[in-house]
Image: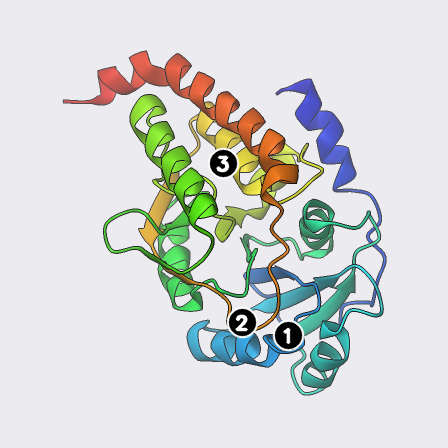
Amino acid sequence: MDPRANSAGNDLNAAAQGEPLPPARDEPGLTLIVPVYNEAENFPRLVAEIERHIPPPFRVLVVYDFEEDSTLPVARRLAAERPWLCPVRNEIGRGAANAIRAGFQKAPAGPALVVMADLSDDLSTVPRMLELYRQGNRIVCPSRYMRGGRQIGGPRLKRFLSRMAGWSLRWLAGFPTHDATNNFRLYDAELVRQLGIESTQGFEIALELTAKAFARGVPIAQTPTTWRDRTAGQSGFKLMKWLPGYLRWYRYALAAGIRRRPAREKEEP
């Protein structure tokens, strides 16, 4: 194993303090991790979509950075009648990457973890993600850019760079998804612990984990999804700040694909 992954994996064992999780009669097989930042307007719709599309049992961890987050009173009010809805304080450090890591640390043993990076993700995709997971895939990647997928709205530059990253890795490296940068993903909990996390800035965590799993030959699947730009609130995506992290893991995935090319060619009929 990459020694850096061992070091990063220790970060997941750091205490992410917050509100204690309520005891569950039956430990859920699915945990949904939702980092939030002032999502008071969007959050009730998200809860409605969860209840509409995701079959129980499950647990939803709402990860927030600070008590003044406008999402928090809404989440606590809704959680009073929904024991599966759990606000979790991120004490690792502010920011998207640390919020996701805090969610991983606080999640039950798994086995399946779904990360939402944006409340624009289509939760009707989750049952298909779980189906592919049960078939043996340890990461499942919803894709906006494969056949059947769609992206509606959003900044043009971000859309262009995201699509080109996925297309180029797919064809140059044999990367197992057309949508390399989508952070709406399902992970096997034990795999996340094995791989560790090195990202510290933003949502490049998804590309990091998928690239590391790809390099190891871990089974990875994709399925079409639709992403719609938000109608309320403001996205926390910071393209220029996070671009170096994305480029790092893009190069990692590209190099892994080149190393694995002889093996892939032998597998092809």
Residue displayed at 53% across by 46% down: 188
Q: Position of residue 217 (x, y in %)?
A: 42, 27
Q: Which amino acid, mark 1?
A: Trp
The answer to whether residue 24 of the structure is visible from this angle is no
Front label number (3 vs 1)? 3
Corner quadrant of residue 66: bottom right
Secondary element under disc 1, as helix, strand or loop, is loop
Q: Residue furthest bottom?
A: 81
Residue 84 — which label? 1
Of label 1 and label 2, which has the lower sequence position?
2
Residue displayed at 59% across by 47% down: 189
Residue 210 — which label? 3
Front label number (3 vs 2)? 3
Compared across the picture, whether 236 is left or right of 258 comes to right
Of residue 173 and residue 266, the one placed in the foreground of this image is: 173
Q: Position of residue 32 (x, y in %)?
A: 58, 62
Compared across the picture, whether 86 is left or right of 259 comes to right
Corner quadrant of residue 119: bottom right
